[in-house]
Each structure stands twice: as C-alpha cells, then as structure tokens.
Amino acid sequence: MTKKVKIYVDNKEILAEEGANLLQVARDSGIDIPGLCYYEKVTPTGSCRLCLVKIEGENGMIPSCTIKVRDGLKVTAFDNELEDVRKTIVELLISEHKLGCMTCDTASSCALEDLAYRYNVTVDNLPYDVKNEFEPVDDSSPVLAYDPNKCIVCGRCVKACYEIQGKGIIDFIGRGIETRIGADLGDLWGNSACDGCGECIQACPVGALFEKASQGKGRKWEIEKVETICPYCGVGCRIEVEKKGNEIVRINGVDKGPANEGRLCVKGRFGYEYEMSEERLTTPLIKEKGKFRRASWSEALDIVADRFAAIKKNYGSDSIAGLASAKCTNEENYIFQKFMRAAIGTNNVDHCARLCHASTVAGLARAFGSGAMTNSIKEFEFADCILVTGSNTTETHPVIATYIKNAVLKHGAKLIVVDPRKIDLVKYATLWLRQKNGTDVAWANGMMNVIVNENLQDGKFIANRTEGFEEFKKVIEEYTPERVEKITGIPKEKIIEAARMYAGAANSSIVFSMGITQHVTGTDNVLSLANLALLTGNVGKLYSGVNPLRGQNNVQGACDLGSLPNVYPGYQKVKDPKIKEKFEKKWHVKLDDKVGLSVVEMMNAAHEGKVKAMYIMGENPMVSDPNLNHVEEALKNLDFLVVQDIFLTETAQLADVVLPAYSSFEKSGTFTNTERRIQLLNPVLRAPEGAKEDWEIIQEISTKMGYKMHYNNQGEIMDEAADVSPIYGGIHFNRLGKKGLQWPCRDDKDPGTVFLHEGKFSRGLGHFSPVDYIPPAELPDKEYPYLLSTGRMLFHYHTGTMTRKVTALNDFEPGPYAEISPEIAKKLKIKEGESIRVSSRRGSIITKARITERVAPESVFIPFHFAEAAANKLTNDVLDPIAKIPELKVAACKVEKI
Amino acid sequence: MNVDKILKRYNSDRENLIQALHDIQDNTEGNYLRTGDLKKAADYFHMSLSEINGVVEFYSMFSKKPRGKYIIRVCQSPPCYIKGAFNVLGELKNLLGIDLNDTTKDKLFTLETTSCLGACDEAPVMSVNNIIYGKLNTEKIKNIIKHYREEKRGK
C-alpha cells in the first residue's frame, strides 16, 4: 500500500498517494490546472509549460506534471503571474496555429480551442503577427493525415507511439521553430513503417493528426457515441463508436476497456467500412436453376425447415452437419448447437476453431484440465520472461503485442522468440531461435533436457502439483542439445541459453498460436509447452502461464458454448451419460451420445455422400479450410446447403438458400475474448432492412421443425446457457457492465477468474505427458522442393469478407502475395512483385512474389486471406489424430516464374 | 569504408550513436548520412528509425543530403555577427554561386552557418572542415577559396 500524504494546493488540503503526479492529483480534486502535453497514459514531458505552479521553498515556476507528491507540499496553482504566463503561451501557440477551426473535425473537442476560450485569446487582440504561410498537409498514409500547421509539438503522439504501442515510428524532426513530427526519416508518412494503428490520433489534443476517412463526416455535437466490442480478433478491445445517423464516423479505443486500455490496431480503428457496404445481404435468396432469386423470409425458412426435416427423415440425423461461427455471439452459438443437437438430433456441429486451436483445447485439457489462456492480457506487461512461439503477435493480435513490447521496453523483460520467420517481435527479442517448421516438440524437449540436467526445475512444484514426471523425464533424456540442433537447426548454445533464461526468470509466460497448433503433431506441441511450464512451476500464478492466443472475436466463446462435436456447452462431454441425461432433462429431448464430425471430417463425409445437408452460419470454409478444391467438390455434392451470413461469401455462392444476418455492430449479446472475458455488445447501428439476427433465424427454423424455441432476447439465452454450463454459471447480462467477467464464474457472487489453476489445476494435478518428436506429414522433395507455410497478416482478417471491403486496408495491402526467400528468387530469377505460380500436390495458385529474408531459406509463406489466390488450395488436410486439426503450417510446394 | 565495420568499432549502447554517426558521415563520399546506413545504425543500436532521425535532424553537423568535399561554416554568434558575419556569408554566396545550405555543382563546397567556434578574438570567423580561419575580409576569403580549388586541381 502506498502512503497517503497531505498536500496543499491554493490552500486546499488534499489527501494523495505519495509519489503520485501533482497535476493529476490537483485535477482529480477539481483544481483545473491547464496543460497540453500531459497525457495520463504516458510519462510526463513537461514541455508545454501550461501547468506551471509555484512550490513553497523552491525557486521559479515548475511544471506540475513533473512533480511527485510528497508530504506537506504547498503549491500555488493560480495567481496573476502564473495566469499571465499561461496566457502568453496560449497566445504564442495561436499565433502559429492555422486557424482552420470552422472546418476542423476536432472543433469543440480541441484542447487549444478550449484554452483560447478560457484565456480570451483571439486573433484581433493577439500581440504577435499571425502566421499565414503554411506547410502542406501530409495525407500519404492510407488512414491518417498530419497537418504540421495545426501541430503544437506537444509530443503526446511520439510518446503514444513508443510508450503505449511500443513502435517508435514517429519522432520530432527539425529544430527550433521548425520542429514538427515525422515518421521514420521524416519523408512522407505513407512511405514509413507506420502500420496505421492510430494511437497517435487518439493522443493528439488538437486537430493535427486526424482520420482521413472521418473528415467532414460530422461535427462533434452531431455525433452520438456508443461503446461496444471490436468485431475483429480475439483480444476483445472495447471500442467507442462515434456515429451520425446510421453511419460510423470514427472509432476510438475505450481507455477503461479491460483488455485494451484504449489501444487499438488498424483494423479495429479503421476497418469498419464493410459495415456500410452496399454488398450487405438484405433479403433471403433461394437458388433456382443455378441462379439466386430474392425470396421472403417465410418462404425461405419454410424451405429450410422442410428440407432439413425431409433429409433427417430419409437419411437420419447424422446426414446433417452444421458449422457455427466464431464471429457470432455466445448466445447465437448456444442456440445453434442446441438446434443441431436437439432439433436435428446430431452432434455434427463444429466451427473454425477446429482449424486454429483444436489442439490447444485437447492438449491443455489433458495437461491442466482447461484449454484456455491461463492468464490475462495485461499480465504480459509484468512477466519477467516471455516465450513467444508460433505467434506473429504483432500482426495477429496487435494489441497483445503492445503489452509484450511494454514488458521489454518499460520493464526490461527477456523475450524469447521461437519462430521460423523473422517476425516483428524478433526486433524486441533477447533471443531468437529459428527452428525448422514442425520441429517444435524437439526444441521444447531440448530446453527441458537442459533444465533437468542443470537442475533448474521447480522440484517443489513438481512434487506437490504434478504427476507423471518420472516417465516424462525418460523421454527428454534423449533430447540432448546436440541432437536437437540436428533436428531443429537451432544452434545448441541458443537452446541452452533459452532454457536458462526461461527457467531462471521469476515469472515466465508462454505465448503461442497457430505456429504451434496447426500441425499433425499440434496436440503434442501444446503438451510440450505445458510440460515446460509444469517443469519450472510457471503456471497457476499471476504473470506466468501458458497462453494460447485465440484468433477470432468469439472463437473462445463459440467453443465455451458447445459449438464442438464432442462437448456440450461448458466442455461437458457428450459421451458422459450423466451429462447427456442432464441436457436431455433441460432440453426435453433425446440426445445422441456419439461424438459428431469435425470440420474436415464433415467435408470428407459430404464428399462421400454421407452428409447430405449442411447449415453454415457466418463461416466461409471455401477460403478458410485446407485443400479447397476438395472442399468445393464436397459442398457441391450436398443435396442442400444453407448459408447464413452478412455477405454473399464464396461459400454462400454455393448455397441453395442464403439467409441475411446482422453484423456485430447491430447486435446485443456477448463475445468471450481470448482471456476468457465475457463482454457485452451494444447495438450501434440499425441493421439493413430485411436482415435478421442469427438467433432469431435459428429459433424460427427450429420451431418450424417442431422443436419449439421462444427466447425474447439474447439475455434469456445466456441465462439458460449459464444454467447448464458450470463455468458460465454466474454470467448474466446485468452483471457484465463495462468490464465483463472472466470465466470460470460459477455463481452470481463469483467475481470471475483472472488467472487459472491457482493452488490446484482444473483437473487436480498437472499432468506431464511424455512426447516424442514426429516429423511433419509432408516435407520438401525433388518434385516439390520448398517448404510452404500459411498464416495471417495485419491488414486483412480471416477470409477477407470484411477487411477486403475496406478501402484503407486495401490501400495498405491490395491483394495476394507470397513471401519467398532471396535464395529462391535468385535461383528462379524472380524479381520483386513478379507473378509466380505456387503449386502443391493438391492445387496451384498464381500470386505475386515478395522477396524477403523474413522467411527462412528455401521457404515460402502465403497469407490465406485472399480468395483469388487462396493459400488453402495448396495446404495439406492431413489431421492431428487427437484434435483433428489439419497441418496448415507445413507442406511441400514448388514455385515457377510465369 | 564499410558501414558494418564502422559500427562494430562501437558497442551497441545508444550513447555511442552520435560518435558512430560522425564516423559514418566522415567516411561517406559526399559527407552525409545515407538512408540505408541510418537503417543499419538503427538496427545496430536497437533504436527506431524515427529516433535516429530525430538526432540527425537536431544536430546541424549531420546531413541527409550529399554535401561538398569542403564544408564551409560561417559563425553566426554575436561577436562575429557584430564584426560582419553577414557580409562574409554574402561574399561566399557570390564567390561560390550558391545559396545557404547548397552545394556547388563541382561538389567541392557546401555553405552552412554555425554557432560560436570559440575564436571570438579573431571574429569574423569561419571554418572549412576542421580548420578555422579568422579576421576575415573579402581578400582573405577569396584566397582561401582559391587555395581549396587549387588543392583539388593539384590532386
């Protein structure tokens, strides 16, 4: 606890924490000391001189933002002399400022405007010449513009870029009166490394930095603000949407957002254009003779209900399969799986979590008893050592990456990156281990071999909290650093150093994503990371744990709510007779006890004609799934396909009936982010006329099929879900507020859980699994000589359905490309940007070459977002035997110049 | 001279940045800092490009534009100003046919200004690379320029 001390500001006694910022303390007590450069979220600068005060016993005037509170401090905040100085500063600023206030989008929320008003500074009473020659505005960035003539050079943006986002792209350039802000080497902003997160805009107190797309869209007083959750990745950033009428004007991060503290990335801040796209579906479509025609809701829903009923009757319940959605709300996923299980009568329900973290759920459930992130996002900032592997965090979870960078830059944490690609985080890393793709079990075993040999393990933790250590120890004995070097290509010294670093830190945390999970050995990889944490006691405490970063906004929730073929909501096994009985009682229907088909298995079954009909809600397997040619054949082979979406996606084009749904800007309901936090959405915009909410559509189909559902709103659905899933037991809309709740949250008094497995693992004891290294299923050979890996990039999201309808994001990255190593380029005489054909045993695509040392020699990386050159035409659909996740991260390919 | 080799003379603590930049600039034809070299320095000192740029822009000794073989810096501090620094600058502009901060076509001279060179008793003062010339007048300036032009031709 910090000590409370008494200070006096203008004779007012204030009780404050010792060491607190004087300006902040004064303002919090209602003493409105002015200031421009002070920004709560970054270190104080003390350059604008507006917050000057006098302190008893000290000479002159001192910027209060640089003073730490101490006992007995006597401060003068206001007297004539101080106010004169302040007025002069405002006058000087105004004399240099381009007074374009009448067309400035910041008007009425501008700090300089407020000060001019407060000190009565106008152009006519200004004792200085007013500047009337101006520099050009730099609007070369796809998302933002910088007007140097409005810049007051307070430096808030510079510090926001470095201290909050950990990027340091912008800084002061020039000197004296010519000082301004510039990116990189001060040339055009658009040519710099700026990735457009817009943190600088949010920090700018005036109109110098602004969103290009928001210009002229609305004045501050015409704007209504609504808080909701970002529709993109699994971080679950809280956003404040500014709207005018039914149109989004701009989006800001909410400073009190529990997962993001005001931070956003380029997609969250600028990626909303799709929402207002004219391509939105506004009416149900029915396909006749290969062409879609518009239809009424009653006609479309009748057809869907009748066809599902007929197929169920003729071929049995298991001839129907459903894909729920990681983009829809928890409530909609609950209803979807309930519909599949109770109305259709099958466990054939899955969603794209199968393609990303199925192996995490399987592996961590086996090791710890729960397959989610053990810690919370903000804890990363305070870990002493972070091991990031198979996660290009900067691009896939940009806001989480900022906390990792904060840990390194602010607190001196050690960062170990284990990744075949030289990702952005490598710049911040103490150690970078470049393994050969698919050798993760080997390097993890190698690190553990060193830890055991050097006696760096946590013996007490192993003895008290784990089981299976002896058996596990036998396996890792064989993984000497020498042998591991041969398998992985990582020099043995680095393996030893990483082992010492990870085991030696007080709090080590592991961060991983699909570079670990999307392998035929995905579950083994996850188990190896769990072993590493168990061995060193780095799990079950604040700041340390094993943290899978979930990809989509609600992929965690879709899993939690049972959109999986083997479990009911709350990870309750369908094979467990007691659980089945419980659900049969609650849902008043007989249920199936067979585990259903997973995503890839559904496609195979459709291909074979065993699955006759599919219901796909908000998913786009025609881009997201491996081996797309096979997927296309499978979907075309169906008797009946229903797709429910906001756009006519590649998958929807193959459907017999398309049902238009609401986007997340239009709904209520909840999303569960990657740190297990259930957060409430608020409807921001009116949905297009003709669309319906997903849960309402499902409810109507179900009722038409004879299994009645009548919920009045999503809140009622969550109440039911909470009732049947113990980990969500205390989740009710009226408890969620602005912070949400983190599961497990078992009853109405449970405050939720910040980090998992404290004192005891969900399964009791932590389980060591002995895991041996198995090579990937398909490795380069003579015919397909290069190693192909696929993944994501910053500016586009999943199958591109949303982001590719956003002009700014397309400006950053207009189309498909393949990263190829300089060695390949040289050998095949390929130049930057040239068209190339990349082929594997399963297909071939034409794309553009991007020659870069980011990929390892003899390697190719292709982002999977682009349907016209879909990486998944090439990927291997071979499955991890336990989790059924396909090996999207390793395949053999060839490259040809065309 | 290879920039990587120059960087390796310093350990990568950021306090060595300025000295390293001087070293790179002095060893670059055209007396300036190339974009590629600044990127290398940023990597080497684990700093962002913008931070390095802030340093380069702040100190007037650094240049991101190619400059002449000889950099003439005319002192602008008060003693020199009083003793006619302004005329010295005008004389040089005439003689070289260039404006302030420009470089002659033959890439021999660049004209800059500087703060006090510490030779006020000799005011007005200018420096050519590291040599200081004081008590300047039209004749003297002409001779100095001639000297450097001949030195170039001689080689």
Image (cartoon, rainbow, N blue to C red):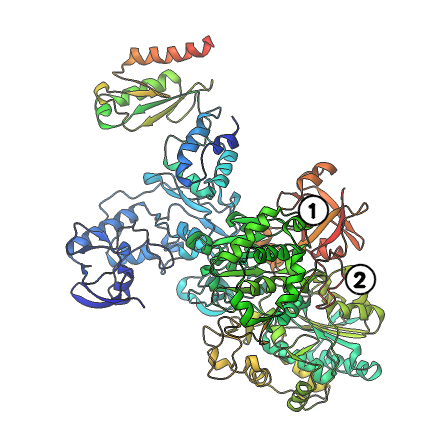
Instruction: Tell me: B50 left or right of A830.
Output: left
- Whole-percent x, y for residue B44 in the image: 49, 39
Tell me: residue A303, above or below residue A618: below
Answer with left or right where residue A543 lies relative to residue B81.
right
Amino acid type of the residue that numbered disc 1 sits on in the rendered structure: Ser
In the image, taking residue A28 as reference, residue A105 lies left or right, namely right
Determine the residue positioned at 27% across, 22% down.
B85
Judging depth in this view, the residue of A605 and A688 nearest the camera is: A605
Observer-nearest residue: B22 or A92?
A: B22
Q: Residues within 10 Å of mark 2 (few under 14, many from 20)?
A: some
Label number found at residue A630: 2
Under mark 2, the amino acid is His
Residue A149 in the image, given as x and y percentages of width and height? 38, 46
Report x, y in % for residue A122: 26, 52
Classify mark 1: residues with Cα within 10 Å, few (<14), some (14-19) or many (20+).
Answer: many
The span from disc 2 to disc 1 (Cα, nearest Å) is 25 Å
Q: Report the residue marked by disc 1.
A: A859
Left or right of B81, for residue B45: right
- Tag 1 secondary structure: strand
**Is there a contact, CB below 8 Å, between mark 2 and mark 1?**
no
Looking at the rendered structure, which numbered label has been put on residue B36? none
The answer to whether residue A808 is seen in the rendering is no
Q: Please tell me whether residue A736 is drawn above or below residue A423 in the rendered image.
A: below
Residue A795 position (above or below residue A275): above
Q: Label 2: chain?
A: A
Kindly tell me whether residue B99 is visible in this rendering. Answer: yes
Q: Residue furthest top?
A: B154
Quadrant of the rendered image containing residue A137: top left
